[in-house]
Image (cartoon, rainbow, N blue to C red):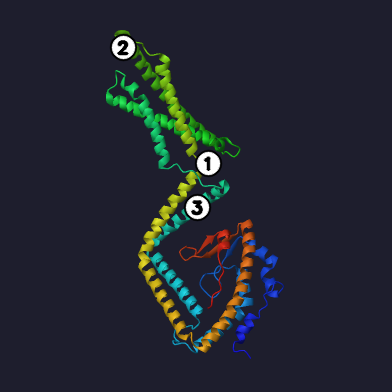
């Protein structure tokens, strides 16, 4: 007769595809009912049940697995306790000890955070508001990114440097013309040239954006107000461009008259109007075209997309900054808990090593290996259900929730995709 009848009973659970236990877990009507639910609360990371499994998975685990698995674990633990050098640790099975330490570590951290939240109610209220704002901004940005299937174009410092160079080139082209005006001093001529350069850079920026965003503003999916915003931007850019051309024409025309008069007095061949005035205007148009092309290439065809990215980053920065400040107040306590847990894990491993040469230990570990091998089949079935559930939950936009003591409600949302990536593990409590 076996010395580990409970281990034998657990390992004899029939988990073949046509077994009754598997049919109960993977029943299509059950997957459909739970996958079509509006809200599903997953199990806590604390406790004997596997973390973050659905209510149906938990019920199946309790009725089909835990009722035989826990006695089997207790049986192995009792066998090791009879040779343990320390009977006061609460468990002799190393995996059970480590799971107990992990649960206690999480509970102690939760208590520390709850205590900190009670002492800083106002700051944590602000933190929760910022977190919700950040989550909403992230949700809107992620949805737009999935629709566009790309990242947005962000007009950073490099773009503004290029537009600045456009203005500088414009300044070089027109400086002589404005300094030749008799009624201007060197300072007013320089100021006028700088203003004209800025207006041309602005016109290039606005026109490039108008052309790039044309489909968004005037397409079939445009919304009320889009066309008006586009035409206002185009009109402002056009006005700036016309002012530039008018100012350049006036300055060059005066420069041309002075040059003709000078040639008549001292002799020489006077310049032509076309070369002096028309050439200058053509140069300004060339600079405008260059700036417009740069603006077109650097703008995003969806003007809201970069703004959603900036909004997400801004809310993230504000949320993370306050979170870091608040965590700094309890960081010392969290480090103490981590250090204590690390020492407890080290002690547990040392106690386990102290028993490893005993015959009873070797037999108990062989039985544990049998149990772990059967655990792998259980995990495989739970993951199979998890995959089918995630597919249904994704189609139905089911709201999945996990325990989160940092939230006022004590829970927070996760997406079906994130849940589908989670690994299921069996604990040894």
Residue 139 in picture, x, y percent from top left: 52, 52
Q: Secondary structure at mark 3?
A: helix
How far is disc 3 from disc 2 in space, using C-alphas?
A: 67 Å
Mark 3 vs mark 1: give the one in front.
1
Residue 320 in picture, x, y percent from top left: 41, 56
Q: Secondary structure at mark 2?
A: helix
Label number found at residue 138? 3
**Nearer to me, 123 or 21:** 21
Q: Earlier in the sequence, mark 3 or mark 2?
A: 3
Q: Secondary structure at mark 1?
A: loop
Residue 216 in picture, x, y percent from top left: 55, 38
Residue 228 versus residue 181 in the image, above or below: below
Residue, disc 2: 262
Residue, disc 1: 302
Give the class, few, some or many, for how many residues have Cα within 10 Å of label 1's Cα (few <14, many ≥20): some
Residue 246 versus residue 124 in the image, above or below: above
- Whether residues under marks 1 and 2 lie with C-beta atoms below 8 angstroms apart, the answer is no
Mark 3 vs mark 2: give the one in front.
2
How far is disc 1 from disc 2 in space, using C-alphas?
A: 55 Å
């Amino acid at each position: 007769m076996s010395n580990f009848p409970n281990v034998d009973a657990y390992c004899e659970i029939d988990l073949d595809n046509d077994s009754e236990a598997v049919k109960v877990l993977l029943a299509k009507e059950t997957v459909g009912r739970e996958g079509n639910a509006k809200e599903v609360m997953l199990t806590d990371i604390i406790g004997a049940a596997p973390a973050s499994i659905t209510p149906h998975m938990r019920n199946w685990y309790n009725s089909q697995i835990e009722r035989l698995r826990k006695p089997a674990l207790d049986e192995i633990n009792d066998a090791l306790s009879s040779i343990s050098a320390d009977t006061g640790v609460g468990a002799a099975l190393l995996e059970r000890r480590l799971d107990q330490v992990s649960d206690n570590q999480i509970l102690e951290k939760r208590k520390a955070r709850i205590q900190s939240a009670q002492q800083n109610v106002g700051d944590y209220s602000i933190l929760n508001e910022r977190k919700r704002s950040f989550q909403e901004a992230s949700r809107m940005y992620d949805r737009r990114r999935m629709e566009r299937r790309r990242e947005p174009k962000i007009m950073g410092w490099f773009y503004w440097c290029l537009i600045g160079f456009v203005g500088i080139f414009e300044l070089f082209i027109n400086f002589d013309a404005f300094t030749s005006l008799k009624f201007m001093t060197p300072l007013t001529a320089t100021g006028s040239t700088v203003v004209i350069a800025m207006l041309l850079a602005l016109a290039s920026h606005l026109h490039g954006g108008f052309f790039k965003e044309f489909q968004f503003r005037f397409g079939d999916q445009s919304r009320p107000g889009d066309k008006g915003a586009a035409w206002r931007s185009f009109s402002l850019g056009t006005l700036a461009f016309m002012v530039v051309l008018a100012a350049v024409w006036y300055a060059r025309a005066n420069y041309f008259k002075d040059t003709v008069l000078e040639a008549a007095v001292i002799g020489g061949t006077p310049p032509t109007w076309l070369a002096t005035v028309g050439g200058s205007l053509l140069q300004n148009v060339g600079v405008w075209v260059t700036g417009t092309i740069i603006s077109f290439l650097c703008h995003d065809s969806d003007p809201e997309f970069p703004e959603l990215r900036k909004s997400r980053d801004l809310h993230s920065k504000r949320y993370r900054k306050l979170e870091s400040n608040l965590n700094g107040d309890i960081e010392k306590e969290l480090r103490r808990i981590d250090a204590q847990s690390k020492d407890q894990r080290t002690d547990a491993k040392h106690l386990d090593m102290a028993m490893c040469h005993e015959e009873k230990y070797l037999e108990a570990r062989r039985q544990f290996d049998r149990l772990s091998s059967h655990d792998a089949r259980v995990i495989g079935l739970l993951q199979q259900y998890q995959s089918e559930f995630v597919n249904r939950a994704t189609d139905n936009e089911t709201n999945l929730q996990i325990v989160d003591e940092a939230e006022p409600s004590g829970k927070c949302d996760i997406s079906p995709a994130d849940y589908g990536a989670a690994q299921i593990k069996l604990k040894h409590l």
